[in-house]
Structure formats: structure tokens, C-alpha cells
């Protein structure tokens, strides 16, 4: 059989879907493990931080000048 007479090889659609699903799953798992430690750092404030950025209302009415 010559090259011109051979039918082209068709990709297996199921194989493509399974491989792309596996790739996405591996990427998500890797991202979870890589970002897991850093996410805790950003979500929980450190006990040594000073809450200087808090806005609080004054304790009483403002003083009136005479």
C-alpha cells in the first residue's frame, strides 16, 4: 500500500477528553498544595500586628466650645 492510499489516523476523542480532564485535575491539585501554606498566611492576621487601620467612633459627643 502506498502512502496516498492509507486512511489518515483519527485521534481518539475519548482519549483527548480523558487526558485533558486528568491534566486539569493535576493542575488543580498542584495549585492547592502550592498555595495551601501561603493562603493561611494571608487569611489569618498575625498576633503581632497592630490594628492601626480600624475606624472607631468617638466615645462621647464632641466637646463644645464656650
Image (cartoon, rainbow, N blue to C red):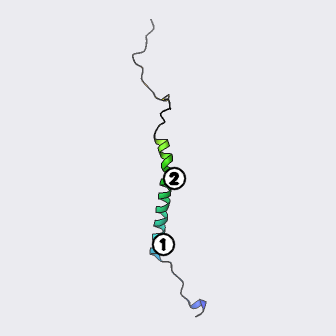
Q: Percent x, y for residue 47? A: 47, 33
Q: In what element is the residue under mark 2?
A: helix
Q: Nearer the viewer, residue 12 or 22?
A: 22
Q: In what element is the residue under mark 1?
A: helix
Based on the displayed image, in which of its 4 quarters is residue 2 positioned?
A: bottom right
- 65 lies above or below 35: above
Q: Which mark is residue 28?
A: none
Q: Percent x, y for residue 46? A: 49, 36
Instruction: Please tell me how crowded label 1 is: few (under 14), some (14-19), or many (20+) other residues with Cα within 10 Å.
Output: few
Q: Percent x, y for residue 5? A: 57, 91
Q: Percent x, y for residue 7? A: 53, 87
**The N terminus, quarter of image:** bottom right
As drawn, which residue projects farthest toward the top? 66
Q: Nearer the viewer, mark 2 or mark 1?
A: 2
Q: Nearer the viewer, residue 38 or 64?
A: 38
Residue at mark 2 to residue at mark 1: CA–CA distance = 27 Å
- Residue linked to disc 2: 34
Q: Which mark is residue 16?
A: 1
Determine the residue positioned at 53% across, 82% down: 9
**The C terminus, quarter of image:** top left
- Residues under numbered marks 2 and 1 in contact, where contact means CB atoms less than 8 Å apart: no
As drawn, which residue projects farthest toward the left? 60
Q: Nearer the viewer, residue 30 or 63?
A: 30
Q: Compare marks 2 and 1 and give the one earlier in the sequence.
A: 1
As drawn, which residue projects farthest toward the right? 3
Q: Is residue 5 left or right of residue 43?
A: right
Determine the residue positioned at 45% across, 8% down: 65
Instruction: Please tell me how crowded label 2 is: few (under 14), some (14-19), or many (20+) other residues with Cα within 10 Å.
Output: few
Determine the residue positioned at 43% across, 10% down: 64
- 48 lies above or below 40: above
Determine the residue positioned at 51% across, 46% down: 38
Amino acid at each position: 500500500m502506498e502512502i496516498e492510499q492509507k486512511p489518515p489516523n483519527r485521534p481518539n476523542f475519548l482519549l483527548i477528553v480523558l487526558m485533558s480532564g486528568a491534566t486539569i485535575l493535576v493542575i488543580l491539585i498542584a495549585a492547592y498544595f502550592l498555595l495551601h501554606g501561603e493562603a493561611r498566611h494571608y487569611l489569618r492576621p498575625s498576633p503581632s500586628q497592630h490594628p492601626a487601620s480600624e475606624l472607631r467612633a468617638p466615645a462621647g459627643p464632641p466637646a463644645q466650645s464656650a
